[in-house]
Image: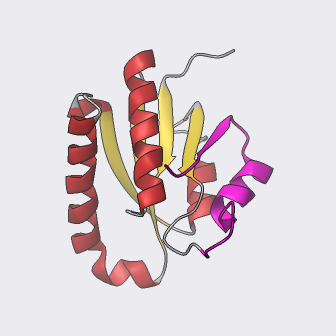
Amino acid sequence: MRPINTIAVGFDGSPDSKVAVRWALTLARHYDAHVVVVHAVGLLGRFDSKNVTTELEESLIALCDECAIVHTRARLEVVDGDACSVMLRMADPPISADLLVVGTRGQGAHAGLLLGSTSLELAEHSPIPLVIVPSS
């Protein structure tokens, strides 16, 4: 098994994505890995990206504190594109993630679904190991 140096985790601010970030930060603390917290910004999100970025950065700092991990071990990447494509690109340089992590469902979740469209598509196409963290 190849070592885990970089973990990319999807984050849209939803409760499921916060659970996934907590899980990734805890794993990173155990393996002394870095975490790239990834927020994919679609067409509509671009109009309010400054406020969204500030909120996500504040959430990330709070989650790092909660998980007892140094803030410098995690960074936020706000990337244009759909969530699945953006997460798949995290396996490539310059990020070169060793592991992808997502929650079961994001903000567009429909009640009753076990997996959201992004987590399902990532499970089908990820070139690296993927962890889908169930909601708590």
In the displayed structure, would residue 63 be above or below residue 15? above
Residue 28 at x, y percent in the picture = 42, 26
Left or right, 37 with respect to 74, comes to right
State the residue lying farthest toward the right.
124
Q: Residue at x 72, y 58 (%)?
A: 120
Q: Is residue 90 visible?
A: no
Q: Compare residues 103 and 38 and report the one nearer the observer.
A: 103
| Quadrant in the picture for the N terminus | top right
As for residue 115 lying within the magenta part, the answer is yes
Q: Residue at x 58, y 16 (%)?
A: 3
Q: Compare residues 66 and 125 and report the one nearer the observer.
A: 66
Left or right, 74 with respect to 11, comes to left
Left or right, 79 with respect to 47, comes to right
Q: Compare residues 104 and 49 and report the one nearer the observer.
A: 104
As for residue 18 lying within the magenta part, the answer is no
Residue 111 at x, y percent in the picture = 61, 74
Q: Is residue 100 visible?
A: yes
Looking at the picture, the colour scheme in use is secondary structure
In the displayed structure, would residue 86 be above or below residue 117? above
Highlighted range, magenta: 110-136
Q: Residue at x 50, y 41 (%)?
A: 8
In the displayed structure, would residue 65 be above or below residue 81? above
In the displayed structure, would residue 51 be above or below residue 7? below
